[in-house]
Image (cartoon, rainbow, N blue to C red):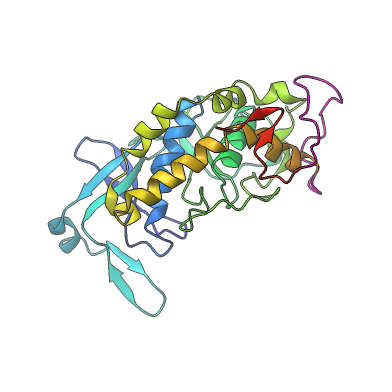
Amino acid sequence: MRGGAQSHLMLGADGYLYVVKFQNNPQHVRVLANEMLATKLAEAVGLPVPACDVVMVTQWLVANSADLYMDLGETRERCIAGLQFGARYVGGLMPGHVVDYVPEEVLLEVRNLGDFAGILTVDKWTGNVNGRQAVFHKKYRERRYAATFIDQGYCFNAGKWKFADAPLRGVYARNSVYSEVTGWESFEPWLSRIEVFDPQKAWGIAETVPPEWYGGDTTVLELLVEQLLARRGRVKEQIELFRGSSREPFPNWRPGGGRPVAPQFSGPAWGPKLDGKRLM
């Protein structure tokens, strides 16, 4: 498969096709943890993402599959056996039509175009430092595509696990996907769901990540989850910074419409209060 992680398309024992990322991918082993965490968080707030799971790749399969290697430029390295991340291939074994790019006039007709505002809330929450990626799919007799959001590997700042917010990070490359955004109501219900996201649910998702994917140091994973929970109330602030950026992403925003914009405050962005409420 295309992409820096050099994923492989594999058929699982359960009969589903999976896009599999290996622990020794060229990006970082933590991108597997990022995929699991961010994909399940996005699913939990109601966004269209592929089903994902931990995939066991046996040593026998690696040894008997000539294509299971990582291209490292001048050298090649065999994929390692063990627990890998697998995202179900959009469309399955008999896809109708799956693409990662559509012309502008087709993009504007995507059935769930408003979900791009939703995934923006998740990308800002999880500190995605990559551009937002999506695939578009439809069945043979369908006219309009639907979007599914893929590749969450660079959430949590890829392998660094330190949040580095910037207005133009974690956003889709084309402004037209935000054409339906008219105010804060366009980010609902996802924004409100993030702001009140159940900590126990977040910890439960974290527990599904195999220790091999983050070096086995549970303290590091716990710190990441604690930071994530503390950011629940800052998503709106990050979207506001994107709205005021040079991209001018929301041309149809109605001044004063919808949910009120958070007031400016004198403290730094990492201060302990936002909208008069203390971060948890």
Magenta-drawn stretch contains 258: yes
Q: Residue 1 in the image: x percent, y percent? A: 41, 55
Magenta-drawn stretch contains 82: no
Q: Residue at x 49, y 33 (%)?
A: 42
Residue 207 visible to the viewer: yes
In the displayed structure image, the side of residue 212 where residue 130 appears, left or right: right
Q: Residue at x 64, y 44 (%)?
A: 172
Q: Residue 233 in the image: x percent, y percent? A: 62, 32
| Total marks placed | 0
In the displayed structure image, the side of residue 256 where residue 120 appears, left or right: left
| Quarter of the image that includes the C terminus | top right
In the displayed structure image, the side of residue 255 where residue 130 appears, left or right: left
Q: Nearer the viewer, residue 123 or 60?
A: 123
User: Which image quarter: residue 17?
Assistant: top left
Q: Residue furthest bottom?
A: 74
Q: Residue 216 in the image: x percent, y percent? A: 29, 54
Residue 105 visible to the viewer: no
Identify the magenta region: 245-266
Q: Residue 32 in the image: x percent, y percent? A: 37, 50
In the displayed structure image, the side of residue 3 where residue 145 appears, left or right: right
